[in-house]
Image: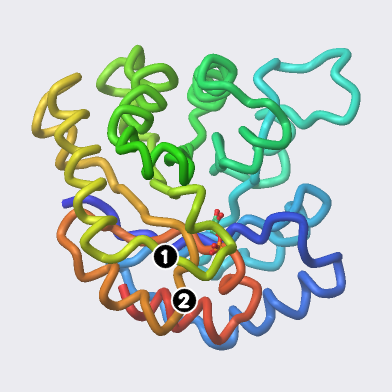
Amino acid sequence: MRKKIVAGNWKMNKNLEETGVLLSELKAKFKNTPSVEVIVAPTFTNLYYASQELKGCDILVAAQNMHQAEGGAFTGEISASMLKSVGVELVILGHSERRAYFGETNELLSEKVKTALRHDMTILFCFGEELEDRKSENHFSVVESQLKNALFDLNEDAWKNIVLAYEPVWAIGTGETASPEQAQEMHAFIRKTIANAYNTKLAEEVSILYGGSVKPNNATEIFAKPDVDGGLIGGASLNAESFIAIAEAL
Ligand code: 13P
């Protein structure tokens, strides 16, 4: 059975002190349910602190990005082994903000994915169409090519470490969510695309999260869809009460 996951992408929010407050609130409210994996992704400067604070608690820590090289002259960048050395085993790659503001292409992401896999990290791989793509009814082909160009040269075994996060760009931080039907339609398409590229068994085992304005008041109906295995949460993950409410809706 595939994993159900709720992950909070804190983006460039929360300094050290604020991170401490949010983590304590999360720990106080969090009730571990073996059926749902809960992940938080604080900013780089607070990853070590977060991984220490969450020791003994079942909330996992992810990084929001990572460089593709093993090390060297890449001023300002962070490598996979640096993340692992501070207790981080998961990394978000391909977020639409990285694609839009930092020029990350599917080809670059393919390299980042391979580096993370070499370090046996789990990857939360984000992708999704822009508003223009949906308006021009190109959303399925855009998503298909994002998957194909970044992931479909991986061998089957590598997929044990891949979690997908479909995040339509027009729904991120806008308050406008995909309807549960739109999310289901795309998630079913993603699974079918993976089944065609690999096989049905693999497609059935991959967790596919939905991201884009998920809130406590809409999480239940989105998560009720059969191909939606959880959520990648931005704004609502910055508040312990709303994030836990979303995790409990799964
Ligand atoms: P919002 O939940 O704020 O729309 O952000 C979604 C997101 O980008 C998570 O990675």
Which residue in the structure is indicated by mark 2? 215
Disc 1 packing (10 Å; few <14; some 14–19; many ≥20): many
Q: Is residue 80 left or right of residue 134?
A: right
Q: Are circles 1 and 2 on residues that touch, CB within 8 Å?
A: yes
Point 31% across, 48% down: residue: 208
* Separation (CA) of disc 1 from disc 2: 9 Å
- Ligand 1 occupies quarter: bottom right
Q: Residue 123 location in percent, x, y?
A: 48, 37
User: Which mark, by number, is residue 177?
Assistant: 1
If you read the primary sequence from the N terminus, does the residue marked by circle 1 or circle 2 appear first?
A: 1
Where residue 83 sits, quadrant-wise, is top right
Amino acid bearing label 1: Thr
Q: Residue 13 location in percent, x, y?
A: 77, 63
Q: CB of residue at label 2: within 8 Å of ligand 1?
A: yes
Q: CB of residue at label 1: within 8 Å of ligand 1?
A: no
User: Which mark, by number, is residue 24?
Assistant: none
Q: Quadrant of the C terminus?
A: bottom left
Q: Is residue 84 left or right of residue 193?
A: right
Along the viewing direction, whichever of 160 and 154 lies nearer the viewer: 154
Label 1 secondary element: loop
Q: Is residue 42 above or below residue 137?
A: below
Q: Is residue 138 left or right of residue 27?
A: left
